Image: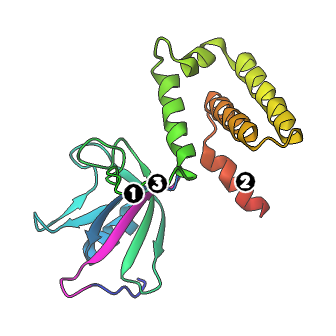
Amino acid sequence: MEKLKFDEKGLLCAIAQDYESGEVLMQAYMNEEAYEKTLETGYAHYWSRSRGKLWKKGEESGHLQKVRGIYLDCDRDCVLLKVEQEGAACHTGNYTCFYTSVKECGAGAEMLGQLQRIVKDRKENPEEGSYTSYLFEKGVDKIAKKAGEEAVELVIAAKNKDKAEIVGECADLLYHTMVLLADADVKLSDVCTELKNRH
């Protein structure tokens, strides 16, 4: 096992991150047994300081964390788990425990992961009046046509050197691309892996 630096209580900090979107989901603690159980099973296990026992994330709620990657920080006293989160990570029902904003910084790349979840939900649970559900109902021809239209509009905006228009058209293209990916059952992580392989 990697040489980990557990604190005086035999614990180290563990951070769970959505492997698709990069969203930080939660922070907990691991002792040596929790770390080894996580490695052995492929599912996140933590040490509950309040209950004084080992627990598998989602063992009661069903909101399991399938571990896709494990990374140690430079001091080896903190572990980062990149996970596939089933349901909500937070006991409040929020997807992430970090939903309370103290200072806004705008949206980052994790917004694409959030959008992917919303689009997937509209595909699986159509809502009346939802444009996304409408696109899925119309099928791949309609979705592909809209993606193509948005790509052309982005090119025109770029040629016009209008930054606000570029931002708006790029957002439209990304949204329709996410619908196209969901229709084909392709995950954003599949595209990111392809980009990484090309790097």
Residue nearest the observer in this picture, 134 or 31: 134
Q: Is residue 136 left or right of residue 95?
A: right
Q: Are marks 2 and 1 in contact (CB under 8 Å)?
A: no
Q: Is residue 83 left or right of residue 111?
A: left
Q: Where is residue 137? Give x, y as percent.
A: 60, 13
> Which three-letter amino acid code belongs to the residue tagged 2?
Glu
**Element marked by disc 1:** loop
> Which three-letter amino acid code belongs to the residue tagged 3?
Glu
What's the residue at 41%, 83% (across, down)?
Answer: 1
Q: Which mark is residue 194?
A: 2
In reply to whether residue 191 is colored magenta, the answer given is: no
From the image, tell me which residue sits under label 1: 103
In reply to whether residue 13 is colored magenta, the answer given is: yes
Q: Earlier in the sequence, mark 2 or mark 3?
A: 3
From the image, tell me which residue sits under label 3: 23
What's the residue at 64%, 38% (across, down)?
Answer: 186
Stretch in magenta:
7-19
> Which three-letter amino acid code belongs to the residue tagged 1?
Lys
Q: Is residue 36 left or right of residue 91?
A: right
Look at discs 2 and 1 and give the one toward the viewer: 1
